Each structure stands twice: as C-alpha cells, then as structure tokens.
Amino acid sequence: MAESLYNLAEQVGKMLVSHHQKLVTAESCTGGWVAQTITDVVGSSAWFDRGFVTYSNEAKHQMLGVHQKTLMHYGAVSEECVIEMVQGASIKSQANCALAVTGIAGPDGGSLDKPVGTVWFGWLVSGGKTKTCQQQFSGGREAVRRQAVCQALKGVLDLYVD
C-alpha cells in the first residue's frame, strides 16, 4: 500500500483542524481500526470526538438508531444500513463530520449477492448530503479490513476537495 494508514489519518486531522471540525466514526467490519488509526496520531483529541464499534445488528440498532426494518429487509451490509449508521453517529456525537463502514471481511459470511470483501461506506458533514459508496475488496480478512480503513479515511478527505 503506497500510503500508510497513519499518514492518511494525519492528513484527515490536518483537514479537519483547518475546517474547525471534529470526526465521529461508526464501524462494523473494521472493528474500531479506523478509530485506532486516528488515535495513533498525536493530537487527534483536537479533531476526533468518538467512535462507535457496532459489530452486531443489535448494537447498530441500540447505539446508532439503525431501524430493525432496515436490518431485516436490506441487511447490515447495505447502503440503507450505512446511511442510518452515519446519520446516527452524527446525531449521537458532538462531531460535524461522520464516517461509517459495514461489510463482510471474511473468510466466511459472504453470499452470491454480497460476497466476502463487500464493504459499504458512508460519510456526512453537518448540513450536507450523505455520501455513500460500495467497494469490493480482495484478499484475506486482514487485507479487506485494511483496505476498508484506507477507503474510509480517503473518503473523509474527498469530502473537502470540492
């Protein structure tokens, strides 16, 4: 990987500080890896508010307000779910920028519709529209998760490019 996760997190921090904003994370398949990467950066308390690790459907519902109907109808690995995750994280925090990630890291848990490596992302800046994307990553569990952390951080930077 050309860019290290630490360097990406540093860039995110500089971008958020320059915009006087704080970040909240809502993670499922990455299990807190995004938040860990962020808090590895010295001074991240100036721009990181909190992180939610919502691995189970019940945690997504209880902590972020993801509707049971969404989980039953679309599943936890869906655009609908990641939208509710990122919006819930934004509402339940003091941050003005939010990111969410949910997916199937493997080695099992995939299906024909949602194979291992399927990951959904959501980003939201207060007052803006929710941005989402879906990626299909390859490799083993750690590789999928690392790529997801990288994509989540790059997505925050992309929010401020336009």
Image (cartoon, helix red, strand yellow):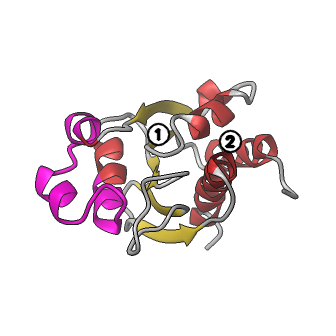
Residue 48, given in percent of the width and then of the height, sits at 55, 33
For the C terminus, the image quarter is: bottom right
Foreground of the two, 55 or 5: 55
Residue 6, given in percent of the width and then of the height, sits at 78, 40
Q: Main secondary structure of the magenta part?
A: helix
Camera-near label (2 vs 1) is 1
Residue 94 lies, with reference to residue 132, above or below; the image says above
Report crowding for label 1: few under 14, some 14 to 19, many 20 or more residues within 10 A (C-alpha).
many
Magenta stretch? 58-84
Name the residue that disc number 1 marks.
24
Amino acid at dot 2: Gly
Q: Residue at x 33, y 50 (%)?
A: 85
The answer to if 61 sits in the magenta stretch is yes
Residue 64, given in percent of the width and then of the height, sits at 27, 41
Q: Which of the 4 image quarters holds residue 26?
A: top left
Residue 76 lies, with reference to residue 94, above or below; the image says below
Amino acid at dot 1: Val
- Give left or right: position of 140 versus 8: left
Q: Residue at x 23, y 65 (%)?
A: 74
- Give left or right: position of 67 versus 10: left
Q: Residue at x 45, y 43 (%)?
A: 27
Disc on the earlier residue, 2 or 1: 2
SS at circle 2: helix
Residue 115, given in percent of the width and then of the height, sits at 47, 67
Q: Residue at x 15, y 51 (%)?
A: 67
Name the residue that disc number 2 marks.
13
SS at circle 1: strand
